[in-house]
Image (tube, rainbow, N blue to C red):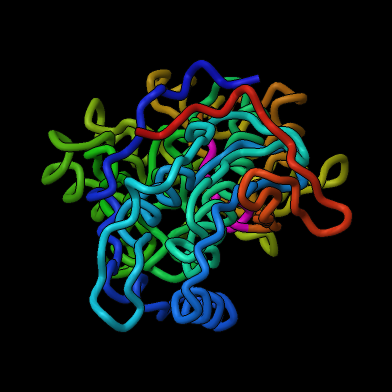
Amino acid sequence: MATEASPRTRLDPSVFRLPVERIRDGYYTDAYFNFTKRLLEEKGRHPRVTMQVFQRHQSVLGGVDEAIAVLKQCAGPGWSNGWEPGWDELEVHALFEGDEVAPWETVMTIEGDYSLFAHLETIYLGCLARRTLVMRNVREVVEAANGKPILFFPARHDHWLVQTGDGWAAHVAGAIGVSTDAQASWWGGTGVGTVPHGLIAAYGGDTVAAARDFADRFAGEMNVTVLVDFENDSVRTALEVADALGEKLWGVRLDTSGLLVDRSLWHEMGYFEPTGVNPVLVERVREALDGAGHQPVKIVASGGFDAARIRRFEEQGSPVDSYGVGSALLRGENDFTADVVKVDGRDCAKVGRRYNPNPRLQRVD
């Protein structure tokens, strides 16, 4: 069931730049786990446990390298008497980033002295939950797009601190581009984007002038893509931009508000849903560009897209070349649970849970 596209290697813990001291001190941990670690250490209790981690969806695993990094850098004894590394005393088995996982399937086990890692459960489960949610959502839109590139554009819809890991998750799940350098940092990439509405406004609403200067400055560094909905006349603006930029233009981006009808469709309404970016608008832009000799110019569709909407466009054969997807990629939940299922070699799980070995797990060096 593993996805062969995901590499059988793991990211080095240094990539994540974890706040190691604060994690070790329990700053980000549910208080009851901190109390548990303190009590075990103070009482001299060192049960060797098997901790088993799973989730409940058909999903795509993310955050596992980050979770392992937390264990490698933050497990250990010494709540109040100085810290000592504890990773070498643990035995961890896990799946890989990007592996497909089934409901209830064990994705990671941690074996060792529970007092060494009791305080880390909140952290490593959170890593898995967030990154797996993004991976599952991105994989769904990638599959819906039938091989057309997906641009990962949700940075503005969430706190900036989540960008690095979210971008990595999107990359592993198949997104071809991310919008910030932070999102691309874990694999050494850079953010991509388009000529934005703000720049066009700064040029007095003149999309062509903004696009021309932008292309003159950045065409050698990126694929220049221009938003063409500033005046709500996407066909006309796309043609004007293509004529002005020539070979410097890679693509135009349609981003009409879902509350508006593009001017080019005003005389066609009546047989389709005319608001926002819709298949008919895409067709009209494509026809206009091709008719003017701009066949190489790509069309990027964005604005409220999710997997279901992308499927509808693809089913209608819409001539979209790439989809920009934002907040839909952050919606939903993909929570993980960790249970102690063995203590000192014997079964010891709460009622309703049991040891569930998984031959797909690989030992972490």
Q: Quadrant of residue 294?
A: top left
Residue 205 seen in render: no
Rendering coords of residue 252 (x, y %): 42, 39
Q: Quadrant of the C terminus?
A: top left
Point out residue 315 in the picture as x, y percentages from the top left corner.
76, 24
Name the residue rendered at 59%, 52% in the picture: 49
Q: Residue at x 19, y 42 (%)?
A: 215
Q: Is residue 245 magenta?
A: no
Relative horizontal placement of residue 109, taking residue 239 as reference (left or right): right
Where residue 47 appears, as percent x and y from the top left, is: 56, 59
Q: Position of residue 269 (x, y in %)?
A: 80, 46
Q: Nearer the viewer, residue 250 or 120?
A: 120
Q: Which residues are magenta?
A: 323-330
Does the segment drawn in magenta span residue 327? yes
The residue closer to the viewer here, 345 or 339, is 345
Q: Quadrant of residue 121?
A: bottom right
Please name whichever residue, 264 or 325, is drawn nearer the observer in this view of the structure.
325
Specify whether residue 324 is in view.
Answer: yes
Above/below status of 117 relative to 119? above
Name the residue nearer the viewer: 219 or 129: 129
